[in-house]
Image (cartoon, rainbow, N blue to C red):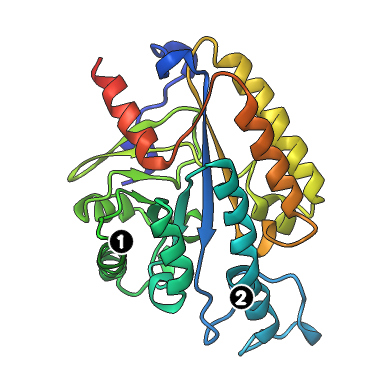
Amino acid sequence: MIPAKRLRYSAIVDRPPLMLPDKARVVVWPVVNVEVWDIGRPMPRQVLPPPTGATLLPDVSHWGWHEYGMRVGFWRLKAILDELGIVPSLSVNARVCLDYPRVAKAARDSGWEFMGHSYDQRPTHTEPDPVGMIRQSMKVIQEFTGRRPVGWMGPGLTETLDTPEQLAAAGIRYVADWVIDDEPCTIKTRGGSLVTLPYTLELNDIAMMVVQHHAAKEWETRCLDYFERVHREGRERAKVMAIAVHPYISGVPHRIKYFENVLRRLRKQKGVLIWNGAQILDWYLKSRKR
């Protein structure tokens, strides 16, 4: 089913406003993405072009680039989140629970929400058995955390035209692949409905620093500029502002201060709630019933 048949076009100005509790204006949704890069496949991202442009297998340099994030960068991010009392969503390849149990345990024990993010980091449309991949991912995360995930984001926000049906059948209730709005939206599937939460490409360290080649300072500036506007608009209707980071990008020494600066600034603002995806989903579903 194509996206246009899953939900009708809806101008935000034509909808009844969603309102947050306690007269809050903005929900900040921090998302930390952790992944498994299989050394037996081409690496998901590259910053160092190989000699003669040939695809490297094994690609040790880019495997190591990501591995640094799991060994060091994750812990920098987590120290700041812990200090500020912020409990994010963890967009997690299920295989992290098996290959990096120390990372997964730290997130689980700190109460982070585990959001499904495939089994390992490969595009959804290349999966030979996507239904089996979703089932396996859900099983591994549930066995590790004791809870079945309610949210999902495909690697690189990838889906096929059948993915929403497959996710709904597996018990997923929200997806983060549809960056279409400032508010949650409901989409149809053949087996019921799913909620889309406003994830971000604009405030995503991969898009900004790896793809667009912006300096880390620009990420901070963009986050604060974005917040300034949605906070103003939040007087009239609730806004959701996602912030997306990866340990191997934002967790490095020359970028970590910008992540910290943004969270400290947002945390001090009036009318701001910092929620995970499950909390946003719960608020939206309750608001829709009113």
- Amino acid type shown at disc 2: Glu
Q: Type of residue at label 1?
A: Thr
Q: Which residue is mark 1?
A: 145
The quarter in which the C terminus is drawn is top left
| Residue 42 position in % (x across, y down) | 58, 80
**Where 11 sits versus 189, above or below?**
above
Residue at horizontal 26%, vertical 56%?
A: 147
Q: Tag 2, which secondary structure?
A: helix
Does residue 190 sit above or below 233 in this rendering?
below
> Residue 128 location in percent, x, y?
34, 75
Q: Nearer the viewer, mark 2 or mark 1?
A: 1
Task: Count the marks.
Answer: 2
Q: CA distance from mark 2 to mark 1?
A: 23 Å
- Mark 2 and mark 1 lie on one chain; the one further toward the N terminus is 2
Residue 25 rendering spot, x and y as whole percentages: 52, 18
2 and 1 marks in contact (CB < 8 Å): no
Residues packed near mark 2 inside 10 Å, few (<14), some (14 to 19) or many (20 plus): some
Identity of the residue drawn at 27% across and 70% down? 136
Residue holding disc 2: 67
The local crowd at label 1, few if under 14, some if 14 to 19, many if 20 or more residues have their Cα within 10 Å, is: some
Position of residue 173 in the picture relative to residue 118 (left or right)? left
